[in-house]
Amino acid sequence: MINLNCQNSQILVFYHSPTLPKKHNHVVFEFDNFNVIYNDPRRFGFFQLIENKKALNERFKHLGPEPFDKKFNFNYVMSFLKDKNKEIKSFLLDQRFVSGIGNIYASEILFLSKIDPFKPAKLLTKNECKKIILNSKKILHRAIIKGGSSIRNFQNISGTLGSYQKEFKVYQQEGNKCKATGCLDIIKKKIVSNRSTFFCDSCQK
Ligand SMILES: [Zn+2]
């Protein structure tokens, strides 16, 4: 149920701005006093009609917990990764393991955790698993406070840009000096399965 009063319905005028392209408006929900417009230039999203609660649970049962979920805990992470040969970075992006971590934040989480993104997941120590859990929450929480990361032109519904990109330690920092105190290395970039990974060889083992 969407309930908007006059005051906060102002935020919805964003997509009625004459300067914004309308070609990415894919779905419009028309209410008596306002419209909710689904605008998706990158076409990552979709809509699906789900008939009942059983079907809803079925639809999402393959998804892993979100980073803020209590289920994303030490026992879960250890037992999920214990026999996995693939590199840890790919699991942070794998929604069956954890939902909602994208490519930017996966690189940032692994840098903060001092873990080599290409380390086989099953070789992570207990302490490294704990760091991943803690730092996933930490980085995402900070990014949410900062309104997300505006790489090209992302804006929130009031038209404001996110500013977490100013705090990137490794993402898109290739060739720059590592920001860890005392580290003299430079940030490197490697492309694996079409996704860029940013890291510091000296800080991440
Ligand atoms: Zn470093």
Image (cartoon, rainbow, N blue to C red):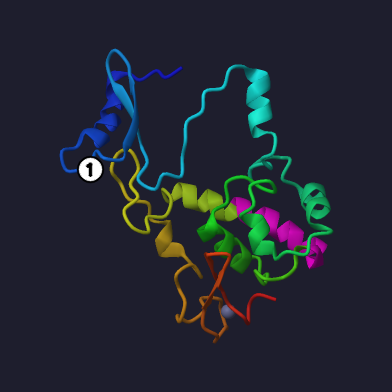
| Position in image of residue 32 (x %, y %) | 29, 12
Which quadrant does ligand 1 occupy? bottom right
Which residue shows up at 64% across the image and 33% down it?
Answer: 60
Q: Main secondary structure of the magenta part?
A: helix
Q: Amino acid at mark 1?
A: Pro
Q: In the rendered structure, which segment of residues is drawn in magenta? A: 122-137
User: Residue 127 sits in which quadrant?
Assistant: bottom right
Residue 49 location (% of width, % of height): 52, 23
Quadrant where the C terminus is found in the figure: bottom right
Residue shown at the point (51%, 60%) measured from the top left: 104
Farthest residue to the bottom: give it: 184
State the image quarter where residue 38 is shown. top left
Identify residue for label 1: 21
Mark 1 is surrounded, within 10 Å at the Cα level, by few (under 14), some (14 to 19) or many (20 or more) other residues, namely: few
Determine the residue located farthest toward the left in the rendered image.
18
Residue 107: x percent and y percent?
A: 56, 64
Q: Which is nearer the eye, 50 or 135?
A: 50
- The picture places residue 185, in percent across and down from the top left corner, at 55, 85
**Which image quadrant is residue 3 in?**
top left
Relative depth, front residue between 69 and 188: 188
From the viewer's perspective, is residue 4 above or below residue 78? Answer: above
Q: Is residue 134 left or right of residue 46?
A: right
Tell me which residue sits at (27%, 15%) in the image. Answer: 33
Examine the structure image and report whether residue 22 is included in the region drawn in magenta.
no
- Is 7 on the left or on the right of 197, as rendered? left
The answer to whether 128 is drawn above or below residue 153 in the figure is: below
Q: Label 1's element?
A: loop
At a point 60% along the width and 61% down the height, the residue shown is 109
